[in-house]
């Protein structure tokens, strides 16, 4: 494509602009090109010729189309950027809403768990060694697995429990339970184990059998009652 440079005075340039405006052409270069191609016999510019659809060349149409496309694109670009920016803001807002809902759900679960713990009956709380000893009456060293048995029985004694030291094992007993057990022994006047069991609870009879096997309790034929020995 060739380029033609035309030098005009200010008056000539203004005149061309006015003519192009009257013809409805906003781009002055298109008008000049049209005038040159439509009036080859004239040395100057014929201002009386009217631009019609029959004398508009495909090249002019192509140039006008491209110019319009650039103008339209320039107008659309800012809106496209705004739409993309709005889409990003919506995505960010949606993410924040999801985070807030997740955090709210976690807080609700934590609150529920806390309320559930507070509403638990006292019986569901973790029992201490002394609580277990009181409920069972006696704890036998041979029946429990202890990492440090000495420390375990020492702790029971310090907390008010009683420990029976026998040749085979140590037996921790609740003081009230043991005192009641000893009192019952003095009221049992039969040497028959089956008959004696009738006077004792299940826990008391278990202790009775243990101590009898170890020779710590015996039946005194003179007093006709059971007695403790070596404790």
Image (cartoon, rainbow, N blue to C red):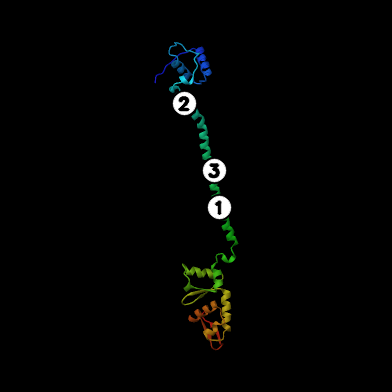
For the residues labelled 2 and 1, the Cα–Cα distance comes to: 58 Å
- Label whose residue precedes the other's in the sequence (3 or 2): 2
Q: Which residue is drawn at 52% across and 33% down?
A: 79
Q: Report which quarter residue 116 is drawn in.
A: bottom right
Estimate how packed mark 3 is, as few (under 14), some (14 to 19) or many (20 or more) residues with alpha carbons within 10 Å: few
Determine which residue is flagged by label 3.
93
Residue 81, given in percent of the width and then of the height, sits at: 51, 34
Looking at the rendered structure, the secondary structure element under dot 2 is: helix
Residue 188, given in percent of the width and then of the height, sits at: 57, 84
Looking at the rendered structure, the secondary structure element under dot 3 is: helix
Q: Which residue is drawn at 59% across and 58% down?
A: 115
Mark drawn on residue 231 = none
Looking at the rendered structure, the secondary structure element under dot 1 is: helix
Q: Quadrant of the N terminus?
A: top left
Determine which residue is flagged by label 2.
65
Asked whether the beta carbons under mark 3 and mark 2 sit within 8 Å of each other, the answer is: no
Determine which residue is flagged by label 1.
105
Q: Report which quarter residue 190 is drawn in.
A: bottom right
Query: Going by the picture, which residue comes out furthest to the bottom?
Result: 222
């Amino acid at each position: 494509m060739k380029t033609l440079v035309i030098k005009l005075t200010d008056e000539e340039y203004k005149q061309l602009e006015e003519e192009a405006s009257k013809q409805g052409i906003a781009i002055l270069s298109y008008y000049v090109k049209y005038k040159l191609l439509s009036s080859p016999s004239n040395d100057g510019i014929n201002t009386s010729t009217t631009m019609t659809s029959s004398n508009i060349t495909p090249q002019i149409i192509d140039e006008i189309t491209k110019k319009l496309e650039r103008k339209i694109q320039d107008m659309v670009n800012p809106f496209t950027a705004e739409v993309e920016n709005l889409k990003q803001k919506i995505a960010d807002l949606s993410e924040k809403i999801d985070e807030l809902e997740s955090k709210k759900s976690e807080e609700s679960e934590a609150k529920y768990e806390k309320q559930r713990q507070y509403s638990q009956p006292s019986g569901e709380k973790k029992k201490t060694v002394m609580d277990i000893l009181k409920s069972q009456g006696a704890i036998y060293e041979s029946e429990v697995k202890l990492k440090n048995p000495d420390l375990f029985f020492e702790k029971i004694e310090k907390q008010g429990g009683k420990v029976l030291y026998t040749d085979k094992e140590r037996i921790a007993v609740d003081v009230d339970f043991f005192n009641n057990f000893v009192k019952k022994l003095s009221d049992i006047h039969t040497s028959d184990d089956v008959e004696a069991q009738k006077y004792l609870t299940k826990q008391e009879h278990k202790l009775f059998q243990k101590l009898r096997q170890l020779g710590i309790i015996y039946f005194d034929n003179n007093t006709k009652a059971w007695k403790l020995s070596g404790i």
